[in-house]
């Protein structure tokens, strides 16, 4: 073929691919809505009166323009969890990190394009504890006529796991911050906003998913709970895991998944059982010893089509209940997370330019002159590398960076712990319990390869921490228990087909190693996705410089950017 003809055809195909993308416009009205759960009606904050909120469906390459109108009484921001936000950090959403909040009576248009991502993500409020009720699914289909890299399912079902408080979640966290104690745990776990058959006044509203024998369904599990990692199982049915955090995986079959707040997991389920009804059930994976948690079980019903109208499906027989692991079954949680692999060999970013080591864990702060609600009169805290993150209040960090405003943050977050110790020992010195409050970021040059060891500590209580990085996906090279030892643990790195995620569970009293390329300019929050921990300061931010030219630089802020 002549070179000119080939070039013409290539150009036409590129043009077609570009024009094939769509712009989707939505309006999110943040409002107070009466909702009845657990026998009582409560006014909760919702989007468009829906709980959970609306599902957004797009194709890879599409652009979203979402006008958020705040008609509630609280400040609000919306985070598009897992979206890379290439050059559009202004639309990322974390309050006082990339934007000031949208105040009551005001609005803000989030504008961003979804590039190079397919699968299940989600959106949620990123202000105080509003995300307890302000959340929804964000589904990215393949571009154009492209297909999934697995069998096309007969149907697809988003399954959003959540938590419900009988009290106002904002009041719950405000009271905990006032006293220094841990906040009250939720009153129920939920599936698509409903607690399920095991709760009072809930059976009539239990989520029922109709299926047909022989068909295959794609379940898009999203853990939108505030503070609870969960085990999920479907009675008598195997699940084939095919994706997580909008990245495809090498398929594997399991009877249970473990999913942490912030994470998504896509599974295929073939309806190969007797015509009956089967429970989908979820309950907590609680890895911290001696720490209160919501020990309830939420259910939905998988109901085979039998042409009958009885409440419980064929013959009115109650649904079959699945086997779930014990609350503290770390072995099952580990077996699941270590089974994740990319579909094929990947090109690992190398060589490493930034070799980082961050501790993640809890702490305690003294309360001078008064007695607080934490252990021995202290106040609960949390930190990375012993620095407890404090959000600004008058300007966002990204604004301060863009306009050179001083006194908002410092760029001296340490690459290693200031004090090295036996991080997972049983008896750690009390002198190491007190983190330092600060607003520190770690600067990264555009294009640098970052390897980060996330090391859990046993201070106060060891726990599995789901760590999320805004604006980035990363490869999970390895995880393990105890203290990370570079001499022996580096040999455990999966440099062939590691999974790619945006939220990694750092094992209880253990470690995880991730790697990514800093190719997205802006300020990107990294935090524990247990909201009680980010409230206590278990966070930091990366400041990624602009690269060379417009395509490697942050776009200017939008004209309707909120002011503090």
Image: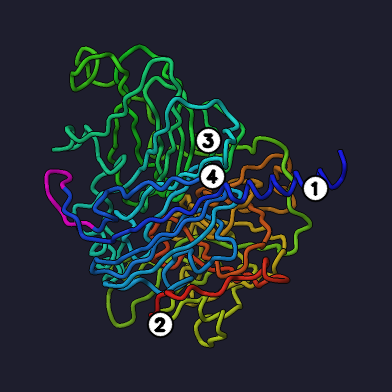
Q: Judge by depth and name the residue closer to the eye, 59 or 133.
A: 59
Mark 3 vs mark 1: in front:
1
Q: Earlier in the sequence, mark 4 or mark 2?
A: 4
Q: How many angstroms separate mark 3 from mark 1 (CA)?
A: 47 Å
Query: From this viewpoint, is residue 418 visible?
Result: no
Helix, strand or loop at label 4? It is loop
- Answer yes or no: do the residues labelled 4 and 3 have beta carbons within 8 Å? no
Disc 2: which residue: 394
Horizontal side of 469 relative to 100 (left or right) equals right
Q: CA distance from mark 1 to mark 2?
A: 53 Å
Q: Magenta segment: does it hold 360?
A: no
- The quarter of the displayed image where residue 443 is located: bottom right
Q: SS at mark 3?
A: helix
Whole-percent x and y of residue 322? 35, 25
Find disc 4 in the rendering and name its residue.
246
Q: Real-space Cα distance between discs 4 and 1?
A: 33 Å
* Quarter of the view holding residue 518: bottom right
Q: Earlier in the sequence, mark 4 or mark 3?
A: 4
The residues tagged by marks 4 and 3 sit, at their Cα atoms, a distance apart of: 18 Å
Task: Give the residues in magenta.
Answer: 36-44
Frontmost of labels 2 and 3 is 2
Are discs 1 and 2 less than 8 Å apart at CB? no
Q: Secondary structure at mark 2?
A: loop
Using the image as rendered, state which of residue 260 and residue 75 is in the foreground: 75
Residue at 50%, 76% in the rendered image:
397
């Amino acid at each position: 073929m002549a070179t000119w003809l080939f070039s013409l055809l290539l150009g036409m195909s590129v043009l077609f691919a570009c024009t094939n993308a769509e712009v989707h416009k939505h309006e999110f009205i943040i409002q107070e809505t009466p909702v009845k759960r657990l026998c009582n009606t409560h006014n909760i904050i919702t989007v468009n009166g829906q709980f959970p909120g609306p599902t957004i469906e797009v194709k890879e390459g599409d652009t979203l323009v979402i006008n958020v109108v705040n008609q509630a009484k609280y400040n609000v921001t919306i985070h598009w969890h897992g979206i890379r936000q290439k050059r559009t950090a202004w639309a990322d959403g974390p309050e006082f990190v990339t934007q000031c909040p949208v105040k009551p009576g005001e609005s803000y248009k989030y504008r961003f394009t979804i590039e190079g991502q397919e699968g299940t993500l989600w959106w949620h409020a990123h202000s105080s504890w509003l995300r307890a009720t302000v959340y929804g699914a964000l589904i990215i289909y393949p571009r154009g006529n492209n297909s999934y890299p697995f069998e096309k399912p007969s149907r697809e079902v988003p399954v959003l796991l959540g938590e419900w408080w009988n009290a106002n979640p904002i009041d719950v966290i405000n009271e905990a911050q006032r006293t220094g104690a841990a906040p009250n745990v939720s009153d129920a776990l939920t599936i698509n906003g409903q607690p399920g058959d095991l709760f009072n006044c809930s059976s009539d509203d239990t989520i029922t998913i109709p299926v047909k024998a022989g068909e295959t369904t794609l379940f898009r599990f999203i853990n939108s709970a505030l503070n609870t990692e969960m085990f999920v199982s479907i009675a008598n049915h195997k699940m084939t895991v095919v994706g997580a955090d909008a990245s495809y995986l090498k398929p594997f079959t399991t009877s249970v998944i473990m999913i942490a707040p912030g994470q998504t997991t896509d599974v295929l389920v073939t309806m190969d059982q007797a015509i009956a009804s089967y429970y989908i059930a979820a309950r907590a994976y609680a890895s911290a010893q001696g720490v209160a948690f919501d020990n309830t079980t939420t259910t939905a019903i998988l109901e085979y089509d039998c042409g009958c109208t009885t409440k419980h499906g064929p013959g009115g027989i109650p649904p079959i209940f699945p086997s779930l692991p014990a609350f503290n079954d770390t072995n099952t949680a580990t077996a699941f997370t270590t089974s994740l692999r990319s579909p094929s060999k990947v090109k690992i970013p190398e060589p490493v330019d930034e070799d980082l080591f961050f501790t993640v864990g809890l702490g305690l702060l003294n309360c001078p002159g008064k007695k607080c609600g934490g252990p021995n009169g202290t106040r609960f805290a949390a930190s990375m590398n012993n620095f407890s993150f404090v959000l600004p209040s008058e300007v966002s960090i990204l604004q301060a960076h863009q306009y050179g405003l001083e006194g908002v943050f410092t760029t001296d977050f340490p690459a290693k712990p200031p004090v090295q110790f036996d991080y997972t020992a049983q008896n750690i010195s009390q002198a190491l319990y007190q983190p330092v409050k600060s607003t520190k970021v770690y600067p990264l040059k555009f294009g640098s390869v970052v390897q980060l060891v996330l090391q859990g500590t046993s201070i106060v209580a060891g726990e599995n921490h789901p760590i999320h990085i805004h604006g980035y996906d990363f490869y999970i090279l390895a995880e393990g228990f105890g203290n990370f030892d570079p001499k022996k643990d580096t040999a455990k790195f999966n440099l062939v087909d590691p999974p790619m995620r945006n939220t990694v569970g750092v094992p209880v009293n253990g470690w995880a190693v991730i790697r990514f390329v800093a190719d997205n300019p802006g300020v990107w929050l990294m935090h524990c996705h247990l909201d009680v921990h980010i409230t206590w300061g278990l966070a930091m931010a990366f400041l990624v410089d602009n690269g060379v030219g417009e395509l490697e630089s942050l776009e200017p802020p939008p004209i309707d950017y909120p002011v503090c």
